[in-house]
């Protein structure tokens, strides 16, 4: 009888264990914290909570070069996303901006031709293996909502973009 009970408990543990791991993984992803590294940058967490995107508009805090914007991408573990395909588009007739990877999660796109007046959107989509997410920055509103450097969660970011 004890052997049968021990076998039943062992079998039940094997069935339940994967469910516990899955529940833990989901709760970890939902509470992921992303780091905004600079003060004078734009920051957003992708709509699916898979990435954070920080946009450097000038060289005041980090050397990115002249006439480019820097795009720093981190995953839900707050690690650099390297080797991703970024599609950077701007509202209007222009096609996607040509993006160049610099390493360490930093990508560069040309700033020439970005609108300087009116309302427009900068859409940054990130694709890599299990990552497929995007963030939308609405100008000029986003310039008035700059957040300080620090940690942010997807839950805390709802309604900030």
Image (tube, rainbow, N blue to C red):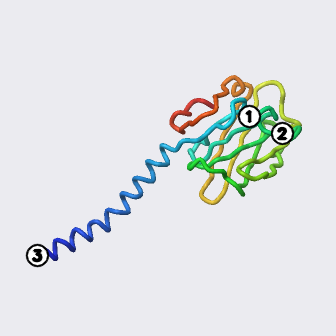
Q: Position of residue 110 (x, y in %)?
A: 85, 42
Disc on the earlier residue, 1 or 3: 3
Residue at 74% x, 43% y is 71
Mark 2–mark 1 CB contact (< 8 Å): no
For residue 1, which numbered disc appears in the image? Answer: 3
Residue at 57% x, 45% y is 48
Q: Viewer-proximal residue, 89 or 33?
A: 33
Q: Position of residue 15 (x, y in %)?
A: 32, 66
Q: Position of residue 134 (x, y in %)?
A: 65, 44
For residue 93, which numbered disc appears in the image? Answer: 2
Residue at 52% x, 44% y is 32
Identify the secondary structure beneath mark 3. Answer: loop
Identify the secondary structure beneath mark 1. Answer: strand
Disc on the earlier residue, 2 or 3: 3
Q: CA distance from mark 2 to mark 1?
A: 12 Å
Query: In the rendered image, which residue does mark 1 sit on?
Result: 121
Q: CA distance from mark 2 to mark 3?
A: 76 Å
Q: Quadrant of residue 42?
A: top right
Which corner quadrant holds the C terminus? top right
Q: Residues within 10 Å of mark 2 (few under 14, many from 20)?
A: few
Mark 1–mark 3 CB contact (< 8 Å): no
Vertical placement of residue 4 versus 127, above or below: below
Task: Locate residue 89 relative to residue 46 in the image: left or right.
Answer: right
Q: Viewer-proximal residue, 119 or 143?
A: 143
């Amino acid at each position: 009888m004890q052997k049968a009970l021990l076998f039943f408990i062992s079998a039940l543990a094997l069935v339940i264990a994967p469910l516990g791991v899955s529940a833990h993984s989901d709760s970890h992803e939902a509470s992921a914290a992303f780091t905004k590294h600079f003060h004078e940058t734009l920051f957003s967490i992708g709509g699916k909570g898979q990435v954070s995107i920080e946009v450097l508009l000038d060289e005041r805090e980090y050397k990115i070069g002249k006439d480019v914007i820097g795009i720093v991408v981190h995953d839900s573990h707050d690690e650099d996303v390297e080797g991703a395909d970024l599609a950077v588009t701007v509202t209007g007739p222009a096609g996607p901006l040509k993006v160049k990877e610099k390493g360490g999660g930093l990508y560069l796109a040309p700033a020439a031709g970005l609108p300087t007046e009116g309302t427009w959107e900068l859409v940054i989509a990130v694709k890599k293996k299990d990552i497929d997410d995007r963030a939308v920055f609405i100008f000029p509103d986003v310039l008035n909502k700059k957040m300080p450097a620090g940690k942010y969660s997807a839950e805390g970011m709802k309604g900030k973009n």
